[in-house]
Amino acid sequence: METIKNIIIGFGKGGKTLAKFLAQHGEQVLVVEKSKQMYGGTCINIACLPSKRLIIEAAHGTSFEDAVDGKNVMTAQLRQKNYQMLASEDNITVLDGTAHFTGNHTINVQTPDGKELTYKGERIFINTGATPSIPDIPGLKNSPFLLNSTDAMNQDKLPRELVIIGGGYIGLEFANMFASFGSRVTILDHHKSLLPREDDDVAEMVIQNFKDNGVKFEVGVNIKDISEQDEQAAITFTRGDNRETTIFADKILAATGRQPETASLDLQNTDIKVDKKGAIVVNDLLQTNVSNVWAIGDVKGGPQFTYISLDDFRIIKDELFGNKERRVSDRLIVPTNVFIEPSLAQVGLTEKEAQKQGKDYLLFKMPAAAIPKAKVLKDTRGLLKVLVDPQTNLIIGATLYIQEAQEIINMVVLAMRAKLPYQMLRDQIYTHPTISEAFNDLFKKPVNN
């Protein structure tokens, strides 16, 4: 059994960045990845980048087939670049295979050619990500029409009729994309209302814009079963009155979240603890309950974002080579973004959350139609909402539903982290025409004071 200084299981964002860093500090690293199609991790291969590429192509009127071909070229280039980034390092070995724990610090790796290799790691970093969760609906898991989020981006042909199960952020992004390509999209969700965390005015505007784009919504439904009729999927569901309705689709996309990928690790051979959802339990430094074993990224549960995985790397880097000051609990101001049209970005408190907490706030709000750049972009849908603490003039939350929201939300985050009063954004000199210059007008006067 060979002993390795650092074993990283999974080629995701946090793990690959850590591998490069450790190697450049003269340490030996073994990176185990079960699929050559996943070099670089989930984001560049099956999530963030390819999905956003397709969303943009759809908005630009590209055909679905050409968009998928272009996406495939991009991901292949990124995979090769990421592989070379690690494989070119003298201190890094990239091993294709599936890792199974045989003890707290020992693994068995089954390679594609049938070999079994055993290793002991002085340090082990688990970075296996998450996998799509398929709901337990009769007939769904074995349906030939079923797609998960990965499958949906690799179709050779655009589905004419698409049913999406789940009206959360993932479901909305795919609905936006496929509807823009020309599919007739229906979203089924068991909740009685969609986007429950968002303020009502924002949620209503988002849903109406989807409806205007041809997307149909069936909410508060219970899906009874999935079957096949006349070479299509037949989806039967009931509403509150228990009346049955059956709709038909060429494909069914399950957009019901992702679960930590721990099932294949054989953690039962270790003392490593997992929670009831299968996520690896870590402390504030991403350490598991087993000494010198860490978990990075989606596999530990919590927010499933590439930038969270990157920050996980920073925490471990600081622990091993820095001042040991960074903590998971430091991440109090983290933005999110839903890549729909227009984009929906959020950070901090919504107005609904502030009211629930009994917080006093100044509300600044304006429609996207008042921004010159929105007219230039030919999309005046949406609005901007920012909440400010009246005592400190500090921003406590923002919801931006507008073109380019994914960019300007970072300005708000920076102001929040630096504890800058909102007047800094109000009085800034911006280039023109830009979406960011909307802050000049947005912050002139609160609407609730």
Image: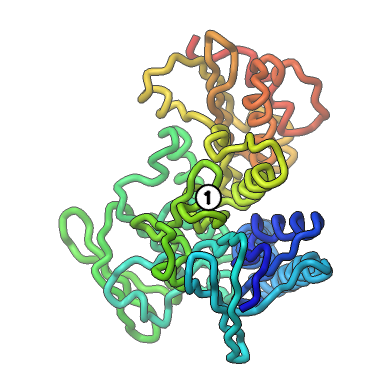
Query: Residue 18 versus residue 231: which sits nearer the camera?
Result: 18
Name which residue lies at 80% across and 54% down.
Answer: 25
Query: Residue 225 versus residue 416: which sits nearer the camera?
Result: 416
Q: Position of residue 285 (x, y in %)?
A: 55, 44
Name which residue lies at 52% across and 31% down.
Answer: 348
Query: Residue 185 versus residue 198: which sits nearer the camera?
Result: 198
Name which residue lies at 20% across and 66% down.
Answer: 244
| The quadrant where residue 252 appears | bottom left
Q: Secondary structure at mark 1?
A: loop
> The N terminus is located in which quarter?
bottom right
| The quadrant where residue 49 appears | bottom right
Q: Position of residue 102 (x, y in %)?
A: 48, 74
In the rendered image, the vertical position of residue 366 relative to residue 78, given as above or below? above
Q: Which residue is mark 1?
A: 287
Q: Amino acid at mark 1?
A: Gln
Whether residue 439 can be seen here: yes
261 on left or right of 233: right
